Image (tube, rainbow, N blue to C red):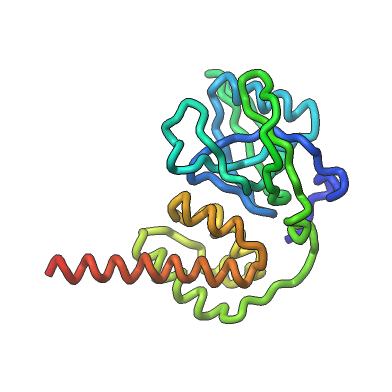
Amino acid sequence: MSRSPFFPKFADLPVEIPIFPLPGAVVMPGVQLPLNLFEPRYLNMVTDALAEAHVIGMVQPTSETLLDEVPEIHHIGCAGRITSYSETPDGRIVLVLTGMCRFQVRSEVEGRHGYRRVSADWERFAADYHEETVTLTDRNGFLGSLKAYCTLRGVEVPWDDVQKMADADLVNLLCAHLPLSPEDKQALIETIPTDERARLMRGLMDMASVASMDVAEHRH
């Protein structure tokens, strides 16, 4: 992953950031996440973020409190920088958030203009800022599991592009965009070493494929 020259240096990452709690929506370093916002509080959040560091933290609510008015959030999320922004005639904001670095929530701080904010600890995920080459232990086996999973889920994948991607970029992209459960995505973003994250992802994909085969056998 080549780091954008517009990203802040690691030492300059903000201490407090706005958060967007959304189940199933995660971002990872170098990955782009498109967002379509229309709620007034999140329009306010984007306006404030653009006036400051352009940073928004993506976190998932816990499944147990998902329906609460103010759900609890997981303690690990990933922050992204607004790298594309446009306003629509019907009052929406369409933007692209490009992942920068994961963070641990120290505490929730006073909200602003209706949206929530947290104090972020970046140190645990400093490796997200390192330009290092990561090689998967068994890339061919990983791609085999990915193909089986995508066939099962009906996910279209540009395989020629996948073959050219660096291992770390591929794993981060899949964390964000595969149709995994929110709980599975949370487990993935909390796993720091890329190779370990790839092994976990492969296990999740293989379990889904086996479960589908078991269902199919019971139907016959």
- Residue 3 visible (yes or no): yes
| Depth check, front residue: 166 or 89 | 166
Locate residue 109, reporting x and y percent: 70, 30
x, y (%) of residue 187? 54, 57
Q: Residue at x 61, y 41 (%)?
A: 58
Task: Indicate the quadrant where residue 150 lies.
Answer: bottom left
In this rendering, the count of numbered labels is 0
Q: Is residue 137 above or below residue 212?
A: below
Residue 83 appears in view = no
Q: Place residue 188 in its image quadrant.
A: bottom right
Relative placement, left or right, of 155 versus 170 is left
User: Could you tell me which residue is drawn at 60 percent across and 27 percent down?
Assistant: 93
Q: Residue at x 57, y 78 (%)?
A: 139
In this picture, residue 156 sits left or right of residue 209: right
Quadrant holding the N terminus: bottom right
Q: Position of residue 123 (x, y in %)?
A: 78, 53
Residue 191, quarter of the rendered image: bottom right
Rendered-image quadrant of the C terminus: bottom left
Residue furthest toward the left? 220
Name the residue: 63% across, 28% down: 116
